[in-house]
Image (spheres, rainbow, N blue to C red):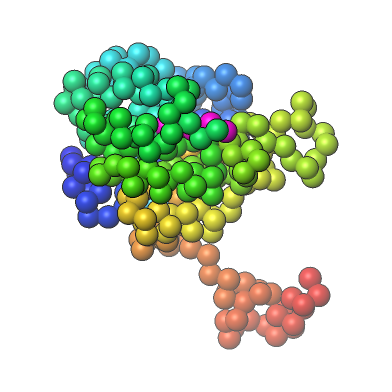
Amino acid sequence: MGKDLISRLNKGPVLCAEGYLFAMERRGYLQAGAFVPEVVLEHPEVVSQLHREFIRAGSDVVQVECQKMFEEQIGWAKEAGVDFIIAETITWVEELKIALKAIKDAGLIAVCNYAFRRDGKTREGILPGEACKILEDNGADVVGLNCFRGPKMTMKLLPEIRKSVSCHVAALPVPYRTTEKDPGFLNQTDEGCDCIPGGNAFPVALDNLYCNRFEMAEFAKECADKKINFIGICCGAEPHHVREMAVALGRKPISYKYYPDMSKHYAHGTDKTLKKHNTDAAKTL
């Protein structure tokens, strides 16, 4: 990555994988609900491995988990020699301004992302473009959105932000098919299932609403086309999503070695070495 995020963004997209808490819960190392990341203390090897998986899939950015005050977090991060700080999943302008000030006081590059609610406004009632302009005016280097909304509902808000600011823009949706009716994933129902306790699919029964890798690839390409260069994926992310996004951006990450090649599949393939009785049978499978 190097030491200057802005120089990298000026040259093109940077890919950032998030969603570690959801990934840990699915693997059985973290309790849904409180989402307190005890896994960092109890199973640090699992945390390290998941970071490796996202890196292999093409993520340019590695994030840590912290729950302390902004100043304490930033102090630790600066001592560790991080390249930049991300303050995100925040719904209040004033709270994000506090985090931003702490980052800039430490002399670090600041990426500041809002999580917008159903009404598409901050908790103070400010629209995305204006809310992000406030951060840019206060010294943010990158502004944008993360979490809550799926790719389509995130993309809905991005043009206004891109038009309102001159700095780089970030976009890191959750990989779920949220809708106009329910733009955020915190209040989703699964009409195909009547056995979800309480009826709310969030957070552990969102499986049927999951975006596939190609949907996330399309989101990455659309971001790049709109000059949105800090591109990523939040809660629910898996390495296969990240890899497809990296490929969509013209890259071949480490795990591209195992990129799907259905031409070799015994029934659906087209390779000349395949047996005809198998490929013929594909029509009856």
Percent x, y for residue 104?
Answer: 20, 25
On screen, residue 258 above or below 27: below
Nearest to the observer: residue 144 or residue 260: 144
Magenta portion: prevailing SS class: loop
Q: What residue is shown at x 77% (from left), y 26% (from top)? A: 198
Q: What residue is shown at x 25% (from left), y 21% (from top)? A: 101
* On-image quarter of the C terminus: bottom right
Q: Is residue 93 magenta?
A: no
Percent x, y for residue 210?
Answer: 62, 46
Describe residue 190's horizontal placement relative to residue 154 as left or right: right
Describe residue 227's horizontal placement relative to residue 47 as left or right: left
Q: How many numbered badges does the structure rendering display?
A: 0
Provide the residue span drawn in magenta.
114-118
* On-image quarter of the N terminus: top left
Percent x, y for residue 51?
Answer: 41, 38
Identify the image quadrant of residue 136: top left
Nearest to the observer: residue 120 or residue 83: 120
Percent x, y for residue 19?
Answer: 49, 36
Q: What residue is shown at x 60% (from left), y 81% (from top)? A: 270
